Image (tube, rainbow, N blue to C red):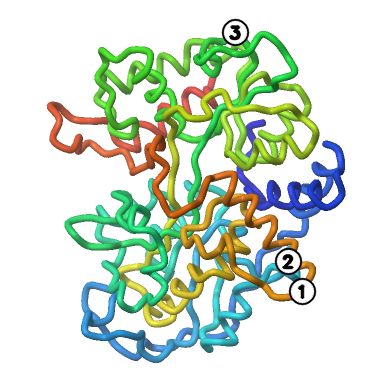
Amino acid sequence: MRRRRSAGAASLAAAAALLAACGAGTGAHEQRAQVVAARATPRPPSATPPVTPSASVSGTASPSPSRTAPGRGEGTVTVVAYRGYAEYGGSDSAVNWVGEFERNTGCRVNLRYAQNADELDKLVSGGDYDAVAAPPQVAGRLIAEKKAAALTTSLIPRYQQIPEWLRTQPAITAEGRVYGVPYLWGYYRTFYDDSRSPRPKADALYSGAVPAVLRDGPLSIADAALRLKESKPSLGVKNPFKLTRQQFDAALALLGAHAAGGRSYWTNPVEAVQALSGGEARVVRALPYTGYVARAAGRPVKALDERGPTTGWVDSWMISAQAAAPNCAYRWIDWAVSAKPEQQAAVWNGLAPANPRGCTWDPGDDAAKAARAALAARVCDAYQVDGERPRDVAFAVRPSKDCGGRDGECTDYAEWAAAWQRLVRPTG
């Protein structure tokens, strides 16, 4: 249950597609997920050499604000993302939004895949990329270190199709400037098997009373802090991603109290489905779409906190401040957040599209595409995508020492990561 993210949520979507089409049981959807993961081989690096950018802009990859379209493409754009965020048909010939982009723009895409947030962070640390689909913890570092370009949003025509609440996420904005374009987002719920009694209590994830499964990642500390906000209001937790030392230590204590008592951790959402479907755990912290997949597998799964406060995140496209191909990068981002790629990405990853048009894009009369559109509608329904911000979701920002005006310093992401490592993978 502690494996690193491999095929990621893409396997979750593949499992759901098979279940929806065939009504298969748990064994069948697990087998399909394993097949997809095995076939998901990286795309060979582009053989096209980079071309000198048509325009040189000092200090930023953003062309002049007076322009309304990117300049001439540079030839090759290097894109860093999780697998499933930029597909070229290597895993499924029907899932290919890279090829269409290349044909339409003449910009060749050189894909570099990361398995998890830490690996993605390392890939972009040297700046040898043009565009990246960054999670909040990576986006925050790139902005703070001035390694991300402030974007000229007028060069992204479809930017305005994304709801304002997503466009203004603190994780991708700073000092009135925009550094990221939202792409996929999600949040977490605590699921339980309703066929077993008694019903788990609100603190079941941390009490040790029943076997529990949490997501494997430092930002899970925020989930524990959110629980403390409800159970120990005297701690004064306001934002679960901005924790003072006292609040941080309390969250770690809550996580560590019963860590050895039947608790495990998932890195691939399919593992969360397996835990629910196989009866391995009583409570599982997972994506809303995980609940749909488990129910499709025949499990009477319900959310323990259907309307309660929870945590979420937004993955966003960013451009390197040292981008060699800023024009192609702008074109890539505008294409990636259009309705068709958003629909395919939402289905493939089991996550909510930032552009709501991805929920309703009409593929025409093609039966396979229509089935994908129907599945996209289910994904959007699971996340309640309607253009409005989910009111009970605290969206992630990279933890930093800046407490946003509070007294004292907060704990930063390096401390979160080190503490999580000690908790989940102790040595000695």
Q: CA distance from mark 3 to mark 2?
A: 45 Å
Q: In the image, which disc is placed on residue 259?
A: none
Q: Nearer the viewer, residue 283 or 364?
A: 364
Per the rendering, the mark at residue 366 is 1
The residue lying at 39 percent from left, 47 percent from top is 389
Give the amino acid at mark 1.
Asp
- Which of the 4 image quadrants contains residue 104? bottom right
On screen, residue 38 above or below 390: below
Residue 370 got which mark?
Answer: 2
Give the image location of residue 146, x and y in percent. 25, 60
Q: Position of residue 300 (x, y in %)?
A: 73, 27
Circle 2 sits in a helix, a strand or a loop, which is it? helix
State the image quarter where residue 321 is shown: bottom left
Name the mark nearer the viewer: 3 or 1.
Answer: 1
Alpha carbons under labels 2 and 1: distance apart = 6 Å
Q: Amino acid at mark 2?
A: Ala
Percent x, y of residue 88: 65, 71
Q: Amino acid at mark 3?
A: Ala
Image coordinates of residue 278 in percent, x first then y, are: 78, 27
Q: Which residue is mark 3?
A: 209
Q: Residue at x 25, y 12 (%)?
A: 234
Point out the tag, 3 or 2, that comes first from the N-terminus: 3
The reply to whether the C-beta atoms of the residues labelled 2 and 1 are less than 8 Å apart is: yes
Rate crowding at label 3 as few (under 14), some (14 to 19) or many (20 or more) other CA atoms within 10 Å.
some
Confirm or deny contact between disc 3 and disc 1 (CB under 8 A): no
Which residue is at 55% across, 15% downward?
204
Q: Quadrant of the N terminus?
A: top right
Q: Residues within 10 Å of mark 1 (few under 14, many from 20)?
A: few
Exactly how many numbered labels are in the figure?
3
